Amino acid sequence: MAAEVTPKKPPDWKNLTDTVQDAESLRQESINAHHDHLITEIETSDGPLGTSLRAVYEGDELVKFKDSLSDHIRNHDKEIERMCNYHYQGFIDSIRELLKVSCDAAQLKDEISEVNSRLQDSCEPLLTKGEELVKCRRVQGNIASAVENLTLCLPVLEMYGKLKEQMSSKRYYPALKTLEQLEHTYLPRVETHWFSQTMKEAIPKLREQIKDASMSDLKDFLENIRKHSARIGEVAMKHAAEQNNMDPAIVQSNKKMKTKRAPKPPNPFTGEIETEEERRNKDIIADQAGDDMGELSAQDLIDFSPVYRCLHIYTVLGDREKFETYYRKQRRKQARLSLQPPSNMHESIENFKRYFHDIVGFFVVEDHILSTTQGLVNRAYMDELWEMSVSKLAASLRTSAASCKESEMMLDIKKLIVLFCHTLRGYGFSVGHLLELLLEMRDQYSDILTRQWVDIFNEIFSEDNYTPIFVESEEEYTAIVTQFPFQDEELEQGEVQYVYRSKETFPKRFPFSLFVPNIYTQVKAYINACLKFSADLHLSHTEIDDMIRKSTNLLLTRTLGSCLSSLIKRSDLTLLQLIQIAINMNYLEKSCSYLEEYISTITGAQSDSAHMARLHGTSMFKDARSDAEEHIYNKLNLKISEFIELANYDWLLPESRGHASGYITDLVAFLQSTFMSFTNLPVVGGAGMESGTCRRCGFSLFKEEEKVAKTSCMSACKHVAVSLLEFIMENNVKQVTMGALQQFNLDLIQCEQFAASAPVPGTRDGTLLMAFADLRQLLDLFLNWDWSIYLADYGQPTSKYIRVKPSDAISLLEKLNNTDNKKKNLFTALKKNERDKKKLIDTVLKQLRGLVNGTASI
């Protein structure tokens, strides 16, 4: 069955089997070669066998590898056995020779031991000396090494000692340079030594100590500069005064400033403290330097080295910005302290001086720092600080100056401000705002002067006797005309001639009282005082002139005008005193032109300038004179009214008494004595007596006196006439008799005689009589019973009774008519003439009413 299934091999299968057998043999050869290679690696390798063994165990022929390995071992054993068999005889021979050599070696050993013993004995001293030499060589090497190391270390230690010395003497910048050299040059040479590391660790601390010490010096400097700022400012202002031709005494302090020196702080490195004796010696030296400070500049009074030193140190250490910020902050604080005025600064000029000295000293120091350092302070910082200071300074000065009550102190303050401006302008600061402040203070100064001059004027008024000035000698006369420019009427024609410049004998009389030259002198003194404030303000002549004229106008109109108004209103002044005041006003009015010339002279302005302000004193004195004259008239009229109030008329009087009433006689006597006292003239002029000349003393009357006297006399006459007319026209008077009118006529005649007597020179032309013309025509109309003439000529310019008003005539005629009606009631039988008179009165009344109503036909 199997034979049938299995096919027969083709003829070529034999070749195929051979090929398969060849492949198998090649594979076996390859495995054997691989095993041989692994065994070779195992035999020859000196390192780990892990790789080779892994290759053996990872393969599939481990048994075959073991067989190959066993074959190799057997082969090597056979080789070893063959080699041993080959060299065995030689080995035996060598052993025999070695045994012979062993005997010789033992002998040699004995000989060597003997030689060694002898050698040890002989070399023992040499070994001892050798050991000593080795020790010496070792010491010598140590010494050389120590010298070498000391040579390297000594400069480091010397530099460190130098650093300590510099720090002890406060030579901070050299100490800082030494510290830099020590750190970068010397310490690297000895970095193997333990102290090198200690020094390296101490270097940052030393730098901080130097910074702190220099900052401590700076703080001491700031404290010191704060104390000596006023002295620096005083020296700077003194030098500025000398350069600007001003009096250095302006800034010289009356009391010497002595500042107690604070104990010097201990040395920050050594802890040393300045002794009391050393401090006293330094105080003495400082006081001597203060006595000679006039020869020094402001910068010589203070040592700025702490600033420079601290600035340089912080710059080197990279903290310059921090230092600049600190310095400026501290100086700003000190600036605010300097600008803070004392609470009682207005009480003494010394306080103002100290205040200005302190501020000037501050900015002088800052200017010196600006010019001697680079960037510590700059111009922008200075300008900002100055602007802040100017505003606070101006506010403080306004407040303090406002409390000043004395003009002399205001002048001293002004001089200090001017010198302050000169000083700081020299250091490049703008002082325009302070000059504007001076212009403000000028008005305040004028107000202070004005208040002072109020007391001066009132004192002059209280001391005056209000009588004309009498001079007994040429010296007295010259003193008056020198003090006051009194001139006569020829001044209007351009000829200036002083009154009484003749060969007349003394005594002589001026028309004004003593307060006229005194007031004029004090006004000039006020002008001079105003001019003092304008000095050194760099104003033009025109500006000074305008300022003085403005102040003078205020003095004349507001101050003097108020004083004069108060004077005139005084109740204790007599009539003659008021008259003298009115006369005085006229001469003070004329003096205004001389005051204008005086102002132009002292200011140097053009007196004929079209833009020049005029003094308002002329109008003020005119108003004062009018006010005085009004008071004269009122006072005189009041006195007249007192006399008239004494009148007690019997309006039903049947017949006149034949003489004037008593009150009229007294009134006329009063008026005569008043005007005679005023003009020194008798009531009636005599033969050979010129008008305007005093009969009693021979002095000529001045036109001003005549004018006031005439006006007063006219006012008195008008007041008497009006008062008399009011008597007769009074509504309470219902009935009047012809006898009462005749008595009233006698009183009027007495007044007319007074008016005609020329109580004042120059009034003989009947001017005074015109005051009584209205009353005279009214009485004449009734006494003469000229109704036909009055009615016929009414309204004509040539009318005899042109001044009689129809209303007045009606009122008086009705009072007469009422009297007649009363008589009619008493007497039943009337005479024919009385009836005719009654009829005439009624007719006249009817026509007069027609005139009043405008319906009458004439």
Image (cartoon, grey):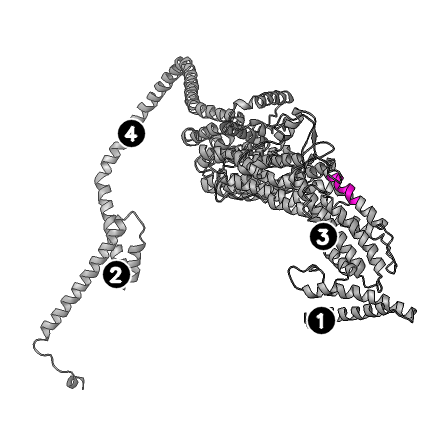
Say which of 296 and 26 sits in front: 296
Read off the magenta span. 670-678
Q: Looking at the image, which residue sits at the far front?
A: 832
Which residue, given by chain and number where applicable, does mark 1 sit on?
Answer: 850
- In the image, 605 versus 699, the foreground residue is 699
* Nearer the camera: disc 4 or disc 2: 2
Q: Position of residue 796 (x, y in %)?
A: 65, 62
Give how far across and how far down residue 637 sits, in percent: 76, 50
Question: Residue 331, position in %: x, y?
Answer: 54, 38
Nearer to us in this view, 353 or 213: 353
Residue at which label 2 appears: 64
SS of the residue under disc 1 = helix
Q: Which mark is residue 251?
A: none
Element assignment for label 4: helix
The residue labelled by disc 4 is 98
Nearer the observer: mark 3 or 4; the answer is 3
- Lower position in the chain sequence, tag 4 or tag 1: 4
Lower sequence index among marks 4 and 2: 2
Distance from disc 2 to disc 3, alpha carbons, whole Å, reads 185 Å
- Residues packed near mark 4 inside 10 Å, few (<14), some (14 to 19) or many (20 plus): few
Counting from the top left corner in percent of width and height, residue 808 is at 75, 63
Please state, as top left, top right, bottom left or bottom right, where the N terminus lies in the image: bottom left
Work out whether 736 lies above or below 847.
above
